[in-house]
Image (spheres, helix red, strand yellow):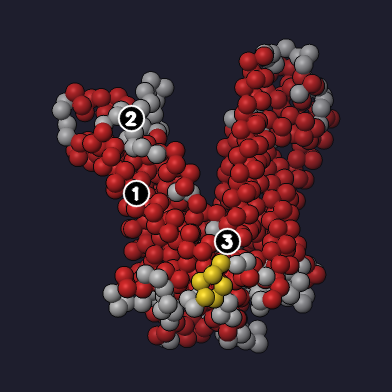
């Protein structure tokens, strides 16, 4: 920030207006060009592939237009159309279970002095580091035909809706918990003080104050879980058995039967509930109003031994379940030959001897995750800066922002199949990227674009616009200010975006299962392939390795974030 050292603290509007128009005009041209290029990239990597999959759904196997014949065929086939009912049933049941558990746990973490809250906050996030395939594999070892807890199934089978619900609830729980913890943390203590003065019962206080204050968080968490459930591929693929769901139907149609047209039809059907949930969630968020005023007092829970220990007893099963599932996965990865030889060894980590891609698949995932984190972070943050900070081009900025919201509503399998249709077309000049590491990086960035874009925009809103005004008055190009000022100031947000992209690139399956090649096999896909080949223990080992890598990445991110925070605090103390 040395370029601003000799400037006055404030800059009047008149100074900016007197800036030579040539410099501003040049900056505006560069900004408009950058935003236009970014819009074209989003068009190519998101909009056109989705349009291609819609077109493919109304074509026959030879590419001829047949209208809605494929849809009629789909809905007239009971085995296929039943997948819609199965998917929605699983989604509603799982959402109900996850929201109930997440609300209970979030309440205990934010509204009580429950012992071990710090441990709970860290440990309950563990499932987010594992690919969705891993809890499904662990459930096979726990409750499968040769599972250690098979007797607890009371004659039922884990291969079907029961296993799918348990596996998806395990995987979705941290996502709902984060939203509800945030919602419950933003509460005005004066409301509860008034209720206490009026001698309102605890139950009535909860129903009349707590629930209304978090209703938008509850709705948002519900739609997030609902969307994750209907779009997940890993859990139903591993433990679903003969219980068809939309995500697995796409895989069967494309990989099993090579029926790409019907795969496109199922993709469009899967896209509709995801789009509906996304639209409702956006509408609800627009209705949300601020619940905290400037005079609000933060709610600090007070010790209540009876309440605190009761909540601990109620919440304790959740981390026990998480520990059991993840611990079983680690144990299974070390067992020599389940269940006949339970001696421990690292034989299952000899991936080069398995039918899944070997250690090269893991190294490919590391490479892909690093490129995704680096390129994705820079691309997303720079474009978010153009959307948030530049003046003018209101229509283009609005359109880009709306386009950036689309990936949140697009299931990974739909996007991956769309990339097959679009980039693998012989007449597409971008055909050369198909089957390379580049297309995996592009697809992963596009798939997780929305959350990163919103994170970047939120961080940029906290930076004073005076930086750009000072740059304009000094005839300093905006990209210099961006590189030397905005990026260093926003380094915590950049690390957050990079960490998010890295971990999701390591764990994603659905978005890349159709577009990898023999040279770009990924670790998450290797887990799927080894499970298909019957090498369940090596599949668990690869899943554990992915989880360990993500935990290490998060630990590095945490260390750097705290280092930056401490450095910022020392700088403020010195100045």
The residue under the point 39% across, 66% down is 165
Q: Residues within 10 Å of mark 1 (few under 14, many from 20)?
A: few
Q: Is residue 175 above or below residue 68?
A: above
Where residue 420 appears, as percent x and y from the top left, is 67, 73
In percent of the image, x 23 and y 36: which residue is there? 306
Residue drawn at (28%, 39%) of the image: 309
Mark 3 to mark 1: distance in Å? 24 Å
Height in image: 29 above or below 251? above
Q: Nearer the viewer, residue 394 or 70?
A: 70
Determine crowd level at label 2: few under 14, some 14-19, many 20+ residues with C-alpha closer than 10 A: few
The numbered dot on residue 316 is: 1
Locate the N terminus and report the quarter of the image it occupies.
top right
Residue 272 makes an appearance in the image: no
Q: Quadrant of the C terminus?
A: top right
Query: Secondary structure under badge 2?
Result: loop
Q: How many marks?
A: 3
Q: Which mark is residue 544?
A: 3
Q: Residue 336: name its quadrant.
A: bottom right
Q: Which of the two residues, 400 or 235, is positioned nearer the viewer here?
A: 235
Residue assigned mark 2: 301
Q: Earlier in the sequence, mark 2 or mark 3?
A: 2
Q: CA distance from mark 1 to mark 2?
A: 19 Å
């Amino acid at each position: 920030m040395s370029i601003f050292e000799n400037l006055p603290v404030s800059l009047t509007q008149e100074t900016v207006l007197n800036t030579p128009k040539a410099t501003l005009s040049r900056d505006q041209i560069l900004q408009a060009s950058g935003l236009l290029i970014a819009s074209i990239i989003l068009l190519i990597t998101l909009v056109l592939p989705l349009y291609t999959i819609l077109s493919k759904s109304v074509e026959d196997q030879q590419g001829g237009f047949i209208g809605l014949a494929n849809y009629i065929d789909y809905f007239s086939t009971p085995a296929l159309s039943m997948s819609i009912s199965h998917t929605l049933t699983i989604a509603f049941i799982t959402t109900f279970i996850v929201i109930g558990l997440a609300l209970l746990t979030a309440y205990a973490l934010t509204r009580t002095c429950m012992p071990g809250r710090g441990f709970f906050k860290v440990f309950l996030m563990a499932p987010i580091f594992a690919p969705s395939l891993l809890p499904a594999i662990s459930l096979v070892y726990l409750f499968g035909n040769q599972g250690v807890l098979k007797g607890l199934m009371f004659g039922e089978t884990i291969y079907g809706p029961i296993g799918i619900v348990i596996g998806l609830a395990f995987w979705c729980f941290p996502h709902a918990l984060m939203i509800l913890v945030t919602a419950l943390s933003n509460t005005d203590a004066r409301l509860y003080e008034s209720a206490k003065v009026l001698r309102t019962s605890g139950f009535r206080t909860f129903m009349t104050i707590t629930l209304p204050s978090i209703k938008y968080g509850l709705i948002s968490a519900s739609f997030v879980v609902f969307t994750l459930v209907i779009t997940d591929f890993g859990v139903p693929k591993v433990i679903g058995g003969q219980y068809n769901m939309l995500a697995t139907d796409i895989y069967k149609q494309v990989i099993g039967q090579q029926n790409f047209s019907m795969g496109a039809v199922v993709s469009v059907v899967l896209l509709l509930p995801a789009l509906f949930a996304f639209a409702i969630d956006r509408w609800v968020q627009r209705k949300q109003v601020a619940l905290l005023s400037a005079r609000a007092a933060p709610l600090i829970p007070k010790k209540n031994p009876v309440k605190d220990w009761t909540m601990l007893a109620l919440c304790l099963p959740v981390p026990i379940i998480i520990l059991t599932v993840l611990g079983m996965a680690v144990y299974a990865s070390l067992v020599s030959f389940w269940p006949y030889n339970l001696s421990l060894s690292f034989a299952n980590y000899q991936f080069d001897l398995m039918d899944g891609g070997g250690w090269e698949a893991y190294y490919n995932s590391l490479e892909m995750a690093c490129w995704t984190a680096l390129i994705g972070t820079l691309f997303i943050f720079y474009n978010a800066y153009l959307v948030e900070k530049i003046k003018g081009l209101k229509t283009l900025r609005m359109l880009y922002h709306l386009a950036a919201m689309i990936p949140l509503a697009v299931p990974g399998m739909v996007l991956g199949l769309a990339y097959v249709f679009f980039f693998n077309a012989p007449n597409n000049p971008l055909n050369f990227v198909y089957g390379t590491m580049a297309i995996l990086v592009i697809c992963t960035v596009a798939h997780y674009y929305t959350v990163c874009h919103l994170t970047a925009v939120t961080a940029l809103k906290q930076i004073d616009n005076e930086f750009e005004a000072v740059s304009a008055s000094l005839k300093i190009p905006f990209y210099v200010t961006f590189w030397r000022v905005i990026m260093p100031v926003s380094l915590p947000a950049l690390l957050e975006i990079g960490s998010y992209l890295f971990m999701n690139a390591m764990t994603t399956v659905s978005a890349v299962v159709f577009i990898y090649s023999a040279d770009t096999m990924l670790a998450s896909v290797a887990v799927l392939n080894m499970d298909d080949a019957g090498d369940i223990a090596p599949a668990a080992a690869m899943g554990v390795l992915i989880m360990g890598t993500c935990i290490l990445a998060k630990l590095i991110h945490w260390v750097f974030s705290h280092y930056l925070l401490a450095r910022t605090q020392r700088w403020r103390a010195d100045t």
